[in-house]
Amino acid sequence: INGQEIECSVLGNENPMASIVGEIVPKNDFYSYKAKYIDEDGAALLIPVRLSKTISKKVQNLAIKVFQTLNCEGMGRVDFFVKKNGEVIVNEINTIPGFTAISMYPKLWEASGIPLSKLLDRLIELAIERFERESKLKTTVK
């Protein structure tokens, strides 16, 4: 697909929220494994993204919709392509997105005003919420 590579992080359980939208600009023609996970200079994350506010909002809404449709909880990152005509195409969802110094998930939240320490706190809170909710479910019959 010929288009901009766009990413949006999602955080939450019942009421997830979307981060600011970022654009991946690979150093080479292809966004390779090495560029994603090893080479700190393999790709740049453009924030703010080179999209209109309308399309950025559409990406955020779609990211939440994908996350909820797949019954995800906690965290996820939804990747998109945006074609020159403005068409937004969902590429994939990463339910365990990278969480390294060069990973896009925490970078997008940092740009959204949630630093790594607060992000970790929130993820722990979400895990506890889920545990407590699931603990209330009856799993045996007497």
Image (cartoon, helix red, strand yellow):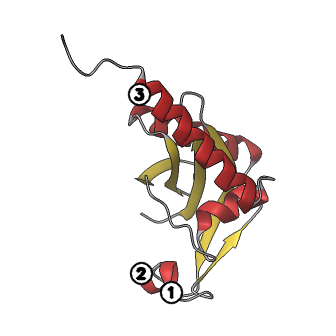
Badge 3 density bin: few <14, some 14–19, many ≥20, Cα 10 Å: few
Left/right of residue 136 with respect to residue 87 in the rendered view: left
Q: Which image quadrant for residue 13? A: top right
Alpha-carbon span between mark 1 and mark 3: 37 Å
> Which of the two marks, 1 or 2, is nearer to us in this view?
1
Are the residues tagged 1 and 2 within 8 Å (C-beta)? yes
| Residue 100 drawn at (x, y percent) | 58, 73
| Residue 139 drawn at (x, y percent) | 26, 22
Alpha-carbon span between mark 3 and mark 2: 36 Å
Q: Dot 1: what SS?
A: loop
Question: Disc 2 designates what residue?
Answer: 33
Left/right of residue 90 with respect to residue 17 in the rendered view: left
Q: Is residue 59 visible?
A: no
Q: Which image quadrant for residue 58? A: top right
Residue 134, numbered label: 3
Amino acid type shown at disc 2: Tyr
Foreground of the two, 142 or 2:
142
**Image point (59%, 35%), residue name:** 16
Q: Dot 3: what SS?
A: helix
Q: In terms of sequence position, does the residue under pointer 3 or pointer 2 come before the other?
A: 2
Badge 2 density bin: few <14, some 14–19, many ≥20, Cα 10 Å: few
Amino acid type shown at disc 1: Ile
Q: In terms of sequence position, does the residue under pointer 1 or pointer 3 come before the other?
A: 1
Q: Is residue 42 visible?
A: yes
Q: In terms of sequence position, does the residue under pointer 1 or pointer 2 come before the other?
A: 2
- Quadrant including the C terminus: top left
Residue 38, numbered label: 1
Foreground of the two, 126 or 101:
126
